[in-house]
């Protein structure tokens, strides 16, 4: 009888090999594992995106799971997001050393969970977690697209098991079921002024001598009156964030607090970004549309959303999108 447990153990090994059961247990998708993948992706982005003395990092994340895993874990998504934000702040504090300021290009952290059986040509199994990160709101949702444009994002590559910058075709996301309950937006605000212990700036370094504007102002940094010709509609948008995205109004864009959404088929998604530049104390614009974007009749060359080329935006300017939507920009500060 003493040998029976050992005999049963051997039989169990024949039915379920140790390596298989151990692997299944190791790679099971738990709330902790989803959190770990998010934090790892975020921390990697600091080293990848930061430049000079400015700390940059990804602020937008897509978390792709197998549909069964999505259903199993969806009730925990709000808690995972809350813990992720806490961890992000801790990571930022631990990496502050070599950087003089925190300079995110977004005003919120955005998380979107989705379920799918396939992603990027790879099968999504119940034990897989895919985290895709980007600096700002350029990640698509579930809409169909005809464009063959690629997004420059970071994701863990299976061959190397490291987060790497990769190009992802927009159509890659059309098989993912992104649901409204799986979307979360968390506003953040950082003190971008130098600490008292930092050395005095070098002569001519405008960035360090410019008083920082608050990221969000009740009065707004600028006012944009826009006219949509196809609808014969006019309205006004108050620019309260340091940087905004001009995009077509679609359900998947509703969660972004810094989006100027325009009801027009002639507006791209995204079409352009407008930002306030601390160094020059001026506004700038970058265009991403294949259609024309003009500022005071001057054509603005197109650039990639992941690598924007910024052009000076006068304090008072007319911005024309695809010859159909007119924006009258007026600085208020």
Image (tube, grey):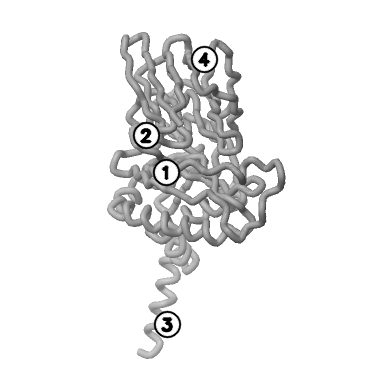
Of labels 3 and 2, the one closer to you? 2
Badge 3 or badge 1: first in the primary sequence: 3
- Where disc 2 sits, the SS reads loop
Residue 226 visible at all: yes
Q: CA distance from mark 4 to mark 3?
A: 72 Å
- Near-viewer residue (140 or 324): 324
Q: Which residue is mark 2?
A: 219
Quadrant holding the N terminus: bottom left
Which residue is outermost to the bottom? 2
Q: CA distance from mark 4 to mark 2?
A: 32 Å
Q: Residue at (61%, 46%) from the top-left corner?
A: 208
Q: CA distance from mark 3 to mark 2?
A: 75 Å
Badge 4 or badge 3: first in the primary sequence: 3
Q: Which residue is mark 1?
A: 108
Picture coordinates of residue 212 (x, y %)? 52, 43
Q: Relative to residue 80, is residue 150 drawn left or right?
A: right
Q: CA distance from mark 1 to mark 4?
A: 28 Å
- Where disc 3 sits, the SS reads helix
Badge 1 or badge 2: first in the primary sequence: 1
Q: Relative to residue 190, is residue 165 drawn left or right?
A: right
Q: Which residue is mark 3?
A: 6
Q: Of the numbered discs in the image, which one, if any, rests on residue 291?
A: 4
Of labels 1 and 4, the one closer to you? 1
Residue 284 drawn above or below residue 7: above
Q: Are marks 3 and 1 in contact (CB under 8 Å)?
A: no
């Amino acid at each position: 009888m003493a040998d029976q447990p050992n005999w049963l153990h051997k039989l169990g090994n024949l039915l379920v090999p140790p390596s298989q059961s151990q692997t299944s247990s190791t790679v099971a998708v738990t709330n902790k594992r989803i959190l770990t993948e998010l934090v790892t992706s975020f921390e990697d982005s600091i080293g990848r995106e930061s430049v000079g003395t400015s700390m940059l990092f990804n602020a937008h994340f897509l978390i792709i799971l197998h549909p069964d895993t999505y259903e199993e874990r969806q009730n925990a998504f709000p808690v995972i997001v809350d813990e992720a934000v806490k961890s992000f702040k801790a990571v930022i504090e631990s990496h502050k050393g070599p950087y003089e300021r925190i300079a995110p290009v977004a005003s919120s952290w955005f998380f979107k969970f989705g379920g799918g059986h396939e992603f990027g040509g790879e099968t999504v199994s119940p034990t897989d977690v895919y985290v895709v990160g980007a600096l700002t709101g350029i990640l698509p949702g579930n809409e169909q697209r005809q464009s063959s444009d690629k997004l420059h994002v970071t994701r863990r590559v299976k061959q190397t098991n490291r987060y790497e910058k990769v190009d992802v075709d927009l159509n890659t996301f059309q098989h993912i079921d992104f649901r409204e309950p799986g979307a979360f937006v968390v506003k953040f605000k950082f003190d971008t002024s130098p600490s008292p212990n930092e050395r005095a700036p070098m002569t001519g370094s405008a960035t360090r001598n410019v008083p920082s504007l608050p990221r969000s102002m009740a009065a707004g940094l600028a006012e944009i009156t826009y006219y949509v010709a196809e609808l014969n509609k006019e309205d006004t948008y108050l620019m309260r964030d340091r940087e905004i995205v001009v995009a077509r109004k679609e359900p998947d864009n509703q969660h972004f607090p810094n989006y100027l959404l325009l009801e027009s088929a002639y507006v791209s998604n995204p079409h352009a970004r407008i930002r306030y530049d601390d160094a020059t104390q001026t506004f700038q614009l970058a265009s991403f549309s294949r259609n024309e974007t003009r500022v005071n009749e001057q054509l603005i060359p197109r650039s990639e959303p992941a690598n924007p080329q910024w052009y000076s935006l006068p304090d008072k300017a007319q911005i024309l999108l695809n010859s159909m939507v007119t924006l009258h920009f007026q600085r208020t500060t």
